[in-house]
Amino acid sequence: MNVRCTCVALATAVAAAASCGAADSIKTTKMTYIGTIKSTSPTEVQFERGGTVTPIPVNEIINVRLDAEPSDLNAARAHAAAGRYNDARESLGKIDPGELNREVTKAEFDFLRAYVDAKTALAGSGDVAKAGSAMVDFTRNHPRSFHVLEANELIGDLLVAGGKYDAAQGYYRKLTEAPWPAYQTRAKVLLGKAELAQGKIAEAKATFQSILDSAAADSEPEKVAAELGIARCLAAEQDYEGAIETARKVVASVDPEDTALSAQAYNALGTALNASGKKRDALIAFLHVDVLYFNAPSEHVEALEHLAQLWTDLNRPEQATQAKQILKQRYNRQ
């Protein structure tokens, strides 16, 4: 389950639950289930309704609400999904873990707490090592939680942020064990990004190209990420025109409403333009992220770091100072 989506209020589910007594509810990409979670695993939830047990694949789950869960737990979900991590942490702080009687509820509480710390650290306002340890503890304490795949991805992200690339790749590879092609492809994207961050350009390029050669039709975001990875590899190889052309094609093809992919595309374009010496064009690319796609924290940080330097290079110290202030105040970056 992707916790970014778990804040969505299930009006129909709540109404149905109210009419037949308290119950668990799961909204999936296909329908909403009202009943009881019987068991969970990293890849599916066994859900009982009307005496029938149905396996629900984790990759189809959009939202989960648990019977008798504290209202502050759902509030924390909503805050976390909206990127309001301090508010989420405050809501979680109102919950007494000792009063959580079900394993699934305890796991939900522990995951949200670790998730908030991880996201805060990745945004530059927390301790990456401590957040990683907390998420590892979650996977050890709740090895059959349906959050395990997402937890492993976050552990990998935190290890990359801490420069521990080899360890990160070990966690990313765990995603390849998922039974869904889109997850397997996503794992390859993450592995390619880790290789690129490590300076293994040839390896990263081969990884990204393998995605483009074999990705399933339903893995469009992963294909886009692979194309952007290729663009960054080309820039690192000093094939600036190839990098710019590749990045521009992605910018033109991505839905402008897709904040994360659009921000990634403009950052890749800005990086290629900047590497080629086209500083003013690079500035415009990064400004797209700063002005339009600032709700993608990691991408916004990357854009601001480039903007601070580009404004300085273009003799605009006031704008450079402003970019640095945002980095410090919003993301705790110096």
Image (tube, grey):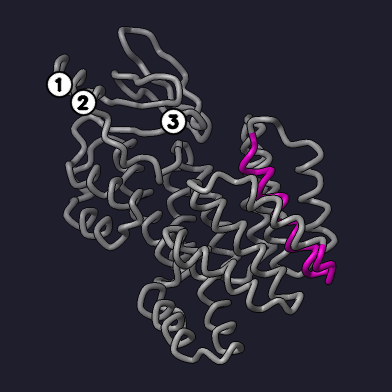
Location of the N terminus by quadrant is top left
Residue stretch in magenta: 219-241
Q: Which mark is residue 18?
A: 1
Residue identifier under label 2: 14
Asked if residue 191 is among those painted magenta in the image, a careful observer would answer no
Vertically, is 211 above or below 246? above
- Answer above or below: position of 35 versus 51: below
Earlier sequence position, callout 3 versus callout 1:
1
Determine crowd level at label 1: few under 14, some 14-19, many 20+ residues with C-alpha closer than 10 A. Answer: few
Which element carries disc 2, helix, strand or loop? helix
Residue type indicated by callout 3: Ile
Viewer-proximal residue among 329 and 132: 329
Residue 230's disc number: none
Q: Position of residue 84 (x, y in %)?
A: 30, 58
Q: Position of residue 98 (x, y in %)?
A: 20, 48
Residue visible at 41% across and 73% down in the picture: 331
| Closest to the observer, 176 or 256 | 256
Residue beneath the point at 27% across and 55% down: 88
- Look at 71% across and 49% down and name the residue there: 226
Which residue bears the numbered disc 3?
61
